[in-house]
Image (spheres, rainbow, N blue to C red):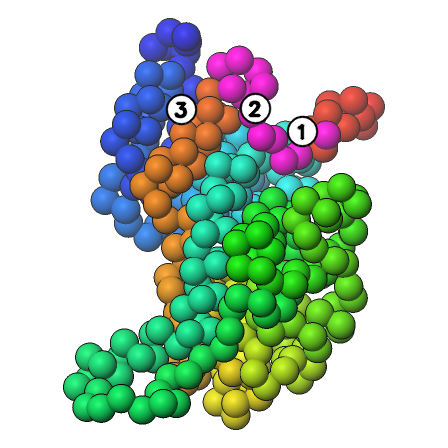
Amino acid sequence: MPTLASRPRILVTRAIFPEVAQRLSEHFDVESNGDDADWSADEIARRLQDKTGALTFGLERITAPLLAQCPSLKICSNMTVGYNNFDLDAMSAAGVLGTNAPDVLTETTADFGFALMMATARRITESEHFLRAGLWTRWQYEMFSGAEIHGSTLGIIGMGRIGQAIARRGALGFGMKVVYHNRSRLDAALEAECRASYVSKEELLTTADHVLLVVPYSATSHHTIGAPELALMKPTATLINIARGGIVDDVALAAALRDKRIAAAGLDVFEGEPKVHPDLLAVPNVVLTPHIASATVGTRRAMAMLAVDNLIGYLVHGKAVTPLNASGLATRALAPAK
């Protein structure tokens, strides 16, 4: 363990579990955002100027201008599996490692994705609001009739670990026909395990009863679902987004929901979150949750501990657990001096 005089300095940009903070303090000098304040980009950059590492939460943009102000920085460890807040090319150029927290949230997030799909298809939010408003006075045969889950067709866009876990839930637990679209096709053995069939994006959109998005965000996946894609979907279909804000064109989706061009949507992520586009708030046929797909105590704690493991692994032992741009740093290290 480093001596007190030589210990790296770490910034924790949001509030975190006390036991996580305690573990960090055993290895590092830690500056924490104990008040969970919303620090501006300038404030984060100022606080990072004398830090060796940072525990980040997927919200903090780590960009070339910020890195230019932080010459001591060696690692930014995201607590989340997503890392579109990192400019990995700029980080590699600056000699800064990025890490994330995959695997530990796969099953919990898949549970939530399936739960959100079911709540959307069965109109649970709409019916609860109806009941709470005192409008339920008698039974009617068509009251809040929703869409079938069991035996229907589930279309998954993005077939990574979470997509595969959702596919297994649908196929094995609910007898669903599962189709998927991905940048690359899974091998035959994995397709068989998930009981999923590869199709084009267009075929998935036109045939699926429930379209579930689990694709990482990037410039190429921006507005994967927009007005043209929504127009391909069945009017009885639902759309579920547990991926990232920006994967769906929220304005186009709100219009499709308002005009009943699709039946309903379930959204855990939004463009510009935590702000939600007012058009989405104005339509009844959408279930809205505040980015909580991984929010169980055990999973969030595991995510935070993996972020700590990455900081300790890299700064104390010289090797991170889940590096994102290790090859970029290696290439930089091997490049001839100019």
Report the residue marked by disc 2: 320
Instruction: Please tell me which residue lies in front, 167 or 24.
Output: 167
What secondary structure is found at the residue carrying circle 1?
helix
Residue 166 is left or right of residue 56, and the answer is: right
**Amino acid carrying mark 1 in the image:** Ala
Which label was assigned to residue 9?
Answer: 3
Q: Using the numbered discs, state the Cα–Cα distance from disc 2 to disc 1 in whole angstroms.
A: 9 Å
Q: Measured along the vertical axis of the image, is residue 262 above or below residue 175?
A: below
Image coordinates for residue 110, horizontal then vertical, percent:
50, 51
Q: Using the numbered discs, state the Cα–Cα distance from disc 3 to disc 1 in whole angstroms.
A: 21 Å
Report the residue marked by disc 1: 326
Q: Using the numbered discs, state the Cα–Cα distance from disc 3 to disc 2 in whole angstroms.
A: 17 Å
Image coordinates for residue 80, horizontal then vertical, percent:
48, 43
Residue at image coords 51%, 68%: 149
Instruction: Please tell me which residue lies in front, 155 or 151.
Output: 151
Image coordinates for residue 211, horizontal then vertical, percent:
60, 68
Q: Is residue 71 visible?
A: no
**Amino acid carrying mark 3 in the image:** Arg
Q: Which numbered disc flags the more N-terminal residue, 2 or 1? A: 2
Quarter where residue 97 is shown? top right
Of circles 3 and 2, the one toward us is 2
How would you rate the neighbour count of disc 3 (Cα within 10 Å): few for under 14, some for 14-19, many for 20 or more? some
